[in-house]
Image: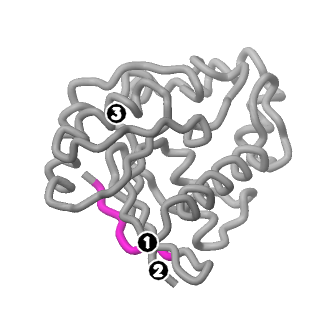
Amino acid sequence: METTKLTIVRHGETEWNVAMRLQGKLNSSLTTVGRKQIEYAAKALRNRKFEMLITSDLGRAMETAMIINSYHKLEVNLSENLRERNFGVMEGLTREEVAEKYPEVHEGYMTRKSNYQVPDGESLVQFYARVSAELKRIVELWPGKNILAISHGGVLDCSMRMVFGISLDACRNFTIYNASINTFSFSNNQWDLEECVNI
């Protein structure tokens, strides 16, 4: 079976990343540092041959995609399913503000109760199902291709858990940095992580 390669880049640092505010489906602009991070990532990827580009349709991801795509000139495919987790009532708030305003929501979020659905948002189970189904759709739609995707920290968390069989309830034992480059391969119905580069 053909091997499909999927390189997922997390968007650059945003204003709300700096302020430690939960973004979810809301958006904040890349910082000056964030744009520089992506320029470095773009240069690291400039000599690679990608045949497809797919990005989350959120502004911070699309801004990231635009910078990276300046070297590749690919058609940009938008995907709602590569969006960050929908944090519902927590979006735009810091964790401290969530704890003060919605203590039960904060407890459900911080203890990683996988079936706990944030009001107006997604549970971890729902989020993981969305992301894993989209990754499967991408590799089935473009078999044997070298695909570039721009997405979010939560999406990469789901991707790592899928590849390594890490429970949704388990605390993350790895770090996902802004502008990190992560290449996955898919062959014979098997996912592998080939590369994880932090910018």
* Residue 146 shows in this picture: yes
Range shown magenta? 192-198
Q: Position of residue 129 (x, y in %)?
A: 73, 52
What amino acid is found at the position of numbered circle 3 in the picture? Glu
Rendered residue at 61%/41% (across/down):
81
Q: Which mark is residue 157?
A: none
- For label 2, the residue is 2
Judged by its main secondary structure, the magenta piece is strand
Q: Is residue 38 left or right of residue 57?
A: left
**Marks 2 and 1 in Cβ contact (< 8 Å):** yes
Q: Nearer the viewer, residue 18 or 195?
A: 195
Q: Nearer the viewer, residue 151 or 113?
A: 151
Colour pattern? one colour
Q: Is residue 91 left or right of residue 42?
A: right
Rendered residue at 43%/62% (across/down):
6
Q: CA distance from mark 2 to mark 1?
A: 5 Å
Task: Say whether residue 196 is magenta.
Answer: yes
Give the mark toward the camera: 3 or 2: 2
Q: Position of residue 15 (x, y in %)?
A: 37, 21
Q: Earlier in the sequence, mark 1 or mark 3?
A: 3
Residue at disc 1, secondary structure:
loop
Rendered residue at 59%/29% (across/down):
24
What amino acid is found at the position of numbered circle 1 in the picture? Gly
Q: Earlier in the sequence, mark 2 or mark 1?
A: 2
In the rendered image of this protein, does residue 81 appear above or below residue 105?
below
* Residue 37 shows in this picture: no
Quarter-of-image position of residue 197: bottom left
What amino acid is found at the position of numbered circle 2 in the picture? Glu
CA neighbours of label 2 inside 10 A, class few (<14), some (14 to 19), many (20+): few
Q: CA distance from mark 1 to mark 3?
A: 31 Å
